[in-house]
Structure formats: structure tokens, C-alpha cells
Image (spheres, rainbow, N blue to C red):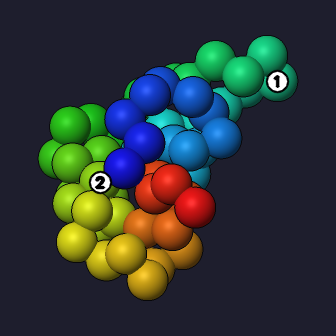
Amino acid sequence: MRFEREARYWDGVTASANASGTLSFGGGAKDSGGRVSHALLGPATDHGRRIRDS
């Protein structure tokens, strides 16, 4: 798993990246937590593949 706060892993999963690569965590904890949970539990999903080393 990649737990660094780099935009290339988390953009679209639980945050959005701006032009400078800074992450913006919006939408609330419940929404973000649900997406992270799905990414962690679903390694074959688009978000699951994005946050894993490969």
C-alpha cells in the first residue's frame, strides 16, 4: 500500500489534486472514509490498483 500523501495515488480516491499537485480533502470524513475502505478492500478496482505498489 502507498500511504504517502502524493497526489498520483490519492487523486480521485479520497482527494482531488490541483495544478501544483497539492491534495484537497473535501466532501467529509464519511465520504472519504468509504472510498478509502473500498480501495483497501477491493484490490482489483480502479481505486484499489491506484493505491497499491505495482
Residue 3: x percent and y percent? 37, 35
Q: Is residue 27 visible?
A: yes
Residue 31 seen anywhere in this rendered image of the structure: no
Which residue lies most toward the front here?
54
Secondary structure state at the residue bearing disc 2: helix
Q: Amino acid at mark 1?
A: Ala
Height in image: 45 above or below 10?
Answer: below
Instruction: Identify the image quadrant of residue 37.
Output: bottom left
6 or 33: nearer the viewer:
6
The residue that disc 2 covers is: 36
Q: Secondary structure at mark 1?
A: loop
Q: Is residue 9 above or below residue 54?
A: above
Could you tell whether 11 is left or right of 5 in the image? Answer: right
Residue at 79% from the left image edge and 16% from the top image edge: 20
Residue 51 locus on image (x, y percent)? 47, 53
- Residue denoted by label 1: 19
